[in-house]
């Protein structure tokens, strides 16, 4: 069993910063790709940031230059540093991870956290 728990969301004024964390726990041999997604009311869930096991990243155009994804493999934790926040960033942010539970597992499994609310006021 694997669990992803997001934290760090909250209410912040435009221009402010937040740091989201996603901690993975359970039966884990290796966490491969991880990502942050967000979903605003009445909108589709969208990819915000993607990070490989080696730390390579990719970002949505809307957040590029403002958000930074990182990971601590020793702690099985994913982070998202969000700076210069805008009201348009308001959404529930979800952590996603591709996890291999055992060294002999045939393939990775896909997991999602429960989400953490980020609200940016103007």
Image (cartoon, grey):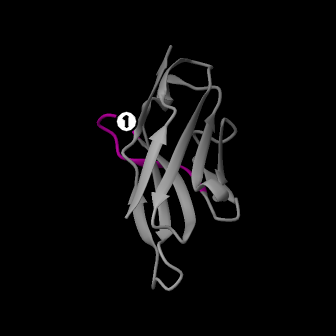
Q: Where does the image place residue 109, in percent across and percent down from the top left?
A: 42, 70
Q: Is residue 69 magenta?
A: no
Residue drawn 66% across the image and 35% down it: 66
Q: Is residue 18 above or below residue 24?
A: above
**Element marked by disc 1:** loop
Residue that carries the numbered disc 1 in the rendered image: 40
Residue 86 vs residue 96: left or right? right
Q: Where does the image place residue 20, in percent across and percent down from the top left?
A: 55, 37
Residue drawn 58% across the image and 51% down it: 77
Q: Where does the image place residue 11, in percent across and percent down from the top left?
A: 47, 20
Residue 70 vs residue 104: left or right? right
Q: Is residue 74 above or below residue 117?
A: below
Instruction: State the quadrant of the N terminus.
Output: bottom left
Q: What segment carries the magenta color? A: 39-50
Instruction: In the displayed orientation, state which residue is furthest to the left.
Output: 42
Question: Foreground: 74 or 121?
Answer: 74
Residue drawn 62% across the image and 20% down it: 16
For the image, the number of numbered tags is 1
Q: Where does the image place residue 102, in percent across and percent down from the top left?
A: 49, 78
Q: Is residue 20 above or below residue 11?
A: below
């Amino acid at each position: 069993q694997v669990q992803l728990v997001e934290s760090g969301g909250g209410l912040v004024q435009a221009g402010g910063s937040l740091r989201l964390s996603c901690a993975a726990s359970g039966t884990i041999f290796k966490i491969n790709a991880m990502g942050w997604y967000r979903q605003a009311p009445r909108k589709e869930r969208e990819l915000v940031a993607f990070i490989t096991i080696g730390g390579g990243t990719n970002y949505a155009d809307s957040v590029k230059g403002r958000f930074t994804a990182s990971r601590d493999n020793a702690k099985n934790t994913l982070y998202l540093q969000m700076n210069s926040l805008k009201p348009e960033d308001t959404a529930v942010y979800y952590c996603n991870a591709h996890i291999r539970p055992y060294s002999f597992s045939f393939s990775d499994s896909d997991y999602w956290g429960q989400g953490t609310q980020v609200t940016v006021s103007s």
